[in-house]
Image (spheres, rainbow, N blue to C red):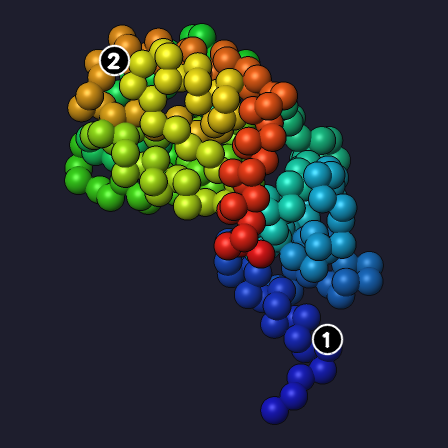
Amino acid sequence: MSYRPDEIEALVRKVVNQVMGEQPSSTFTAATGGKRPLIDADLIHQLPPNSTYAVPPNALITPLARQTALERHIRLEEGGAGQPAPVTSKPAIAIGADHGGFTLKETLKKMLATTHADYEVVDCGTHSTDSVDYPDFAYAVAQLVATERAWRGIVIDGAGIGSCMAANKVPGVRAAMCYDQATAVNSREHNNANVLTLGAGLIGPNLAQQIVQTWLATDFGGDRHARRVDKIMAIEKRFYK
C-alpha cells in the first residue's frame, strides 16, 4: 500500500503531536501557509554546524530534530510571542558519579557553584547511594565532553580507575585519574586531559577539591606536548574511521 505525499505529511504531523503533547493534527494546515511550523531533523541537517537557528514562534520541534541539533552543535533559539528566548552562554562542566562517588560529587558540585560561578555545572547522576554501574555515568560525562557540549568533565567512583577506562573508550576523550595536585597538573600540562576521574575511597573531600581546582585552572603546555597528544589521538583514529 502506498501513500500520497500529503497523506505521509499528515501522518507525521499526527505522530509529532502525540509525542509533543500538542493538540490534534487539525490545528495544523499544510506546510505552505501552515499555522504551526514543524522543525524536523531534515531541516536541521540543512543548517551549517555550530550555528544558531531562530525557531519561529509557535513552532513544534521534533525530538529527533533536537537530538540532531545537539549532535551538530546547532543552538535552537526558541522564543514566545515572537521574542527570542534568553540564552545562556556559560560553558559547562559535566560531573557524574556512581553510588560510591555520590557523596563526593555533591560536595564538588557545591564547591564548583562557588568557585566557578561562570560555568554551568551539569549533573549526569547518580542521584543517590543506591547501587549503580559506573560505566553508565562515565559515558554520560565523556559524551558531553566529546561532543563539545561540556568544556570539561569530572567522574567519581570508588577508585577512579574503572571510570577512567570507560571514559577513554569515547573518541575524543582524554581521561586522567588523579590522586594529588601533581598528577592534576601533569594531566593538564602534558596530556591536555579533558576528563578527570577521582576515587572517593582513596582521597578525602578536601584533597578532592584541591585536585579539581588545580585541574581546572591548569593550562595545556603545548609545544612538544602537543606533538605527543596528537600521536595519542592518531592511535585512536586508527580504530575509529
| Residue that lies at the very extreme toward the right in this rendered image | 33
The quadrant in which residue 54 appears is top right
Is 4 situated above or below 134?
below
Image x and y of residue 62, in percent? 59, 54
In this rendering, the count of numbered labels is: 2
Residue at the spot x=31%, y=37% of the render? 163
Residue at the spot x=22%, y=17% of the render? 203
| Residue that lies at the very extreme toward the bottom in this rendered image | 1
Depth check: give the residue in front, 52 or 163: 163
* Residue 205 badge: 2
Is 172 situated above or below 220?
below
Left/right of residue 144 with respect to residue 110 in the rendered view = right
Image x and y of residue 101, in percent? 24, 28
Mark 1 or mark 2, earlier in chain: 1
Image x and y of residue 43, in percent? 72, 55
Image x and y of residue 65, in percent? 62, 53
Depth check: give the residue in front, 103 or 184: 184
Label 1 secondary element: helix
The residue labelled by disc 1 is 6
Label 2 secondary element: helix
> Are the residues tagged 1 and 2 within 8 Å (C-beta)?
no
Local packing at callout 1 (Cα closer than 10 Å; few below 14, some 14-19, many 20+) is: few
Residue at the spot x=73%, y=75% of the render? 6
Q: Is residue 125 visible?
A: no
**How far separated are the C-alphas under marks 1 and 2?**
61 Å
The quadrant in which residue 121 appears is top left
| Residue type, mark 2 in image | Pro
Left/right of residue 200 with respect to residue 39 in the rendered view = left
Depth check: give the residue in front, 186 or 122: 186
- Frontmost of labels 1 and 2 is 2
Is 80 situated above or below 86?
below
* Residue 150 badge: none
